[in-house]
Structure formats: structure tokens, C-alpha cells
Image (cartoon, rainbow, N blue to C red):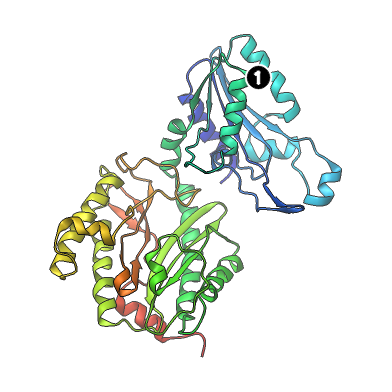
């Protein structure tokens, strides 16, 4: 993306802000896990979307008052000592060039600016990222910043920013679609390499390494913790240990993603470890494949992902009863227990509302699965699709998914 894109998105967000309000979006911070060891920094995706800058400890402030709009970027002062340890810091001029924001101030100047605007009653409402946190989980940085703001400025009404940013981020621009297609290409190359190099006796992490090697070789990053789950492990949705031996008679489910310039491809394929499906594996696999193809055939503007999921459950009930795998419709939930779609973009599970009708330009996953612990079989087939005016385009179509194509690919091993 270029600064014209980010400037346009800021303008669109400012148009949504009511008079006398502001939006505050932090870039995030580096999190320490032990002494000098830090977790890899991940920029807040809203901050990146509206600035194009990938750096910690910055804040974007959008202001609308007195019929004026302002975009202000607050950044840390350059610290030569810190630069010796962690690398070059961004200057005001560099931040302005990347983002297209003229008003770049230092973080230690931000409080005075906000205090003046709020004291003079120019700003009465603040939109901030308010994130849901599961019980027992630590609070998030965005929530801490919002709570601190409420404590400092109790007369300012704080509202959630996400309902304003969600419609923008859900519908992708032409540039974003092209960026996603490139991430898909990197992901497809990595999947082909991984599938061709799968052999009985290997550890799951060897498949993971093969995938991640190709992604990194092509300038990408791993989008999330790779799932390489063989046999019974594939019946656990978020299995990430990847440390078991892949046995000759097992299938292996591989849910992996590539991140290229922050845009993401998220793909799942399930294959027989020895390259040939057994009759039972083929039976269940083809039910999942038919479900994948069915959802792709009906995904179009006007339907929501919640509706797609309901239709999938109805489809599964029919297919599983016909195969003698269940007797009653309500048994589907024993073998299928997740949603069929989520939004894809700057995040693997990008911000979206499952009840909002799909629109052209949205990119979603189509990922039906079936998980039969009694057979030691878990199967998921996930494609990334772009919603078009009349239906959808499968972006991940180059990655083999039929029984015949998988067996043919795996017959042409890259290793002995």
C-alpha cells in the first residue's frame, strides 16, 4: 500500500466521525518475556491500515471539530542509545512521507494537545479500540489505553471505534486484493513443497519447517502458529504442538498461513501421510470436499457467513445420514464444531460481523471440516475466496484438493 491509500482511508474514517469527536489508535508495544528477550512486535492492524507505518509506541489521532478535520501522528523522540540496541528509529520527516500526515508531533507533546482540545470543549467524544477479553485472560494494550484515557478525561464519552473501522476493512480495495493474491501465491508454493515432501515416519514439525522455509524464502512471514496435526491430533482444532510422528496409515491436517506485507493467506489441506487414501479416509474426505465446493457455489453478496454456516450444517446432515455416519440431524455437532467462514485481511481472523451480508470485495475463508475421533480422522479443507458481484472467486484454486490431484502430487516426491 502507498500513502495515497492510507490518506484515503483516514479521510473515509474522518467522514464517519461526528462533529466534536476524535479517534485514537495506538501502534502497539514490544512485549518482554524474559530479561533481554522480547516477543516479535506485531503492529496494531488499524494503525497500519490508516498510516502504513510498522513501528511500536506511536499513536494516531484523528480530530473533527469546528467543521475542521486533523490527522495527528505522535511518535517517540529518536534515542541514539536505543538505536544502538534495536535499530534505527523513525524521524518525523520519514513518518510524514510514509503516512501522508503533515502534523507529526512527539509523544510527550500529545497530552498537552489533547488537554487543550478537551478543556476548551472542542472534543466531547473519543472513539477508541475496545477489545473483548475472555475471562481469565490478561487485558489488552488498547483497553489499558482506553481506561487510562477515561480516568484522565472523565467528562469525555468513550465509544468503541471498531464499528466505524469494520466496514472499511471488510471490503478490500483493488490494491489489497492484489496483495492478498501475492500472499496466496507464496502460500501455494509452500503447500506444494510441504505436500511433496510428506513421508511416513517424519515428525509433524518437519512438515511445518518445509512450509515455513518456502514462505520465508519468498520474503513472507508465517501468519500464525502452523497446525500440522496427524491422526487423532487432527480432531483438536487448534493443535500446535506439531511434535508427533506421522504414521503410514494416518492423514495429516495442515492449517498454515503466509503473511506478505501484512496481507494474509490462510489455507488448510488434509492429505494421507503415505500419499494414498484408504476407503474410509476417502469417504469422509469427499464429504468434506463436497461441502467445500457447495459453500463456494452459493457464497455471494447478500448472504452472511452465519447463513453459510447454517446451510453447511443442513448439507452435512443430509450427506452424513446418507453415508450412515449419523442417524439424526442434531448429531452433526458431534463431528463439526466450528464456523465455516471468517474474514481475511490484515489479520488471519480479520474484523467482521458474521451476520452482516457479504459484499463484493470481501475476502473470506471457506473451511468445512469433519472430525471423527473414533476413526482417528480429522479433515478440514480451507480456501480463501473473494466475493464478486455475482458469486465468488477462489483465490487458492492452485493448491490441490481433490483425492486424485493430491495422490498425483504426492506420487511425485521431491525426496527419496
Q: Residue furthest right?
A: 81
| Figure quadrant of residue 59 | top right
Residue 314: horizontal and vertical position, in percent?
Answer: 18, 55
Q: Residue furthest front?
A: 136
Which residue: 61% across, 48% down?
42
**Compared with residue 156, is residue 307 higher up or lower down, i.e. above or below?**
below
Please say whether residue 76 is visible from this viewpoint.
yes
Q: Residues within 10 Å of mark 1 (few under 14, many from 20)?
A: some
Please say whether residue 70 is visible from this viewpoint.
no
Which residue: 65% across, 19% down?
114
Residue 404: horizontal and vertical position, in percent?
Answer: 30, 79
Q: Residue furthest top?
A: 120
State the SS at label 1.
helix
Residue 295: horizontal and vertical position, in percent?
Answer: 26, 57
Residue 47: horizontal and vertical position, in percent?
Answer: 58, 38
**Compared with residue 33, is residue 24 higher up or lower down, i.e. above or below?**
above
Q: Nearer the viewer, residue 337 or 73?
A: 337
**Compared with residue 416, is residue 172 higher up or lower down, i.e. above or below?**
above
| Figure quadrant of residue 46 | top right
Q: Which residue is mark 1?
A: 114
**Compared with residue 331, is residue 166 higher up or lower down, i.e. above or below?**
above
Q: In screen coordinates, is 347 left or right of 387?
A: right
Q: In screen coordinates, is 225 left or right of 88?
A: left
Which residue: 43% across, 82% down?
247
Amino acid at each position: 500500500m502507498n500513502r495515497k491509500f492510507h490518506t484515503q482511508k483516514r479521510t473515509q474514517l474522518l467522514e464517519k466521525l461526528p462533529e466534536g469527536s476524535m479517534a485514537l489508535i495506538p501502534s502497539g508495544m514490544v512485549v518482554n518475556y524474559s530479561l533481554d528477550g522480547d516477543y516479535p512486535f506485531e503492529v496494531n492492524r488499524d494503525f497500519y491500515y490508516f498510516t502504513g507505518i510498522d513501528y511500536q509506541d506511536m499513536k494516531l489521532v484523528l480530530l473533527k471539530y469546528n467543521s475542521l478535520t486533523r490527522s495527528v501522528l505522535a511518535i517517540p523522540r529518536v534515542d541514539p542509545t536505543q538505536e544502538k540496541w534495536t535499530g534505527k528509529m523513525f524521524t518525523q520527516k520519514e513518518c510524514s512521507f510514509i503516512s501522508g500526515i503533515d502534523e507529526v508531533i512527539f509523544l510527550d507533546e500529545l497530552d498537552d494537545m489533547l488537554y487543550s482540545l478537551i478543556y476548551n470543549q472542542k472534543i466531547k467524544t473519543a472513539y477508541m479500540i475496545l477489545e473483548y477479553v475472555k475471562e481469565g485472560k490478561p487485558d489488552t494494550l488498547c483497553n489499558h489505553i482506553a481506561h487510562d484515557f477515561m480516568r484522565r478525561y472523565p467528562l469525555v464519552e468513550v465509544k468503541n471505534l471498531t464499528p466505524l473501522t469494520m466496514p472499511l476493512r471488510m471490503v478490500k480495495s483493488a490494491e489489497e486484493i492484489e496483495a492478498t493474491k501475492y500472499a496466496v501465491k507464496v502460500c501455494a508454493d509452500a503447500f506444494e513443497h510441504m505436500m511433496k515432501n510428506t513421508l511416513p515416519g517424519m515428525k509433524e514439525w518437519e512438515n511445518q519447517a518445509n512450509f515455513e522455509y518456502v514462505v520465508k524464502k519468498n520474503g513472507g512471514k508465517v501468519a500464525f502458529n502452523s497446525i500440522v496435526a496427524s491422526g487423532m491430533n487432527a480432531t483438536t482444532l487448534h493443535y500446535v504442538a506439531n511434535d508427533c510422528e506421522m504414521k503410514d496409515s494416518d492423514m495429516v491436517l495442515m492449517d498454515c498461513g503466509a503473511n506478505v506485507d501484512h496481507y494474509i493467506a490462510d489455507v488448510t489441506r488434509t492429505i494421507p501421510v503415505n500419499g494414498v487414501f484408504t476407503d474410509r479416509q476417502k469417504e469422509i474426505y469427499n464429504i468434506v470436499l463436497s461441502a467445500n465446493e457447495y459453500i463456494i457455489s452459493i457464497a455471494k453478496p447478500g448472504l452472511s457467513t452465519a447463513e453459510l454456516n447454517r446451510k453447511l450444517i443442513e448439507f452435512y446432515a443430509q450427506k452424513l445420514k446418507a453415508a450412515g455416519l449419523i442417524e439424526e440431524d442434531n448429531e452433526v455437532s458431534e463431528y463439526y464444531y466450528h464456523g465455516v467462514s471468517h474474514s481475511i485481511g490484515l489479520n488471519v481472523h480479520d474484523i467482521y460481523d458474521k451476520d452482516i451480508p457479504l459484499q463484493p470485495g470481501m475476502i473470506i475463508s471457506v473451511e468445512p471440516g469433519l472430525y471423527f475421533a473414533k476413526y482417528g480422522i480429522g479433515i478440514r479443507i480451507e480456501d480463501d475466496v473473494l466475493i464478486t458481484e455475482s458469486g465468488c472467486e477462489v483465490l487458492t484454486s492452485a493448491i490441490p484438493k481433490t483425492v486424485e490431484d493430491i495422490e498425483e502430487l504426492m506420487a511425485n516426491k521431491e525426496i527419496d
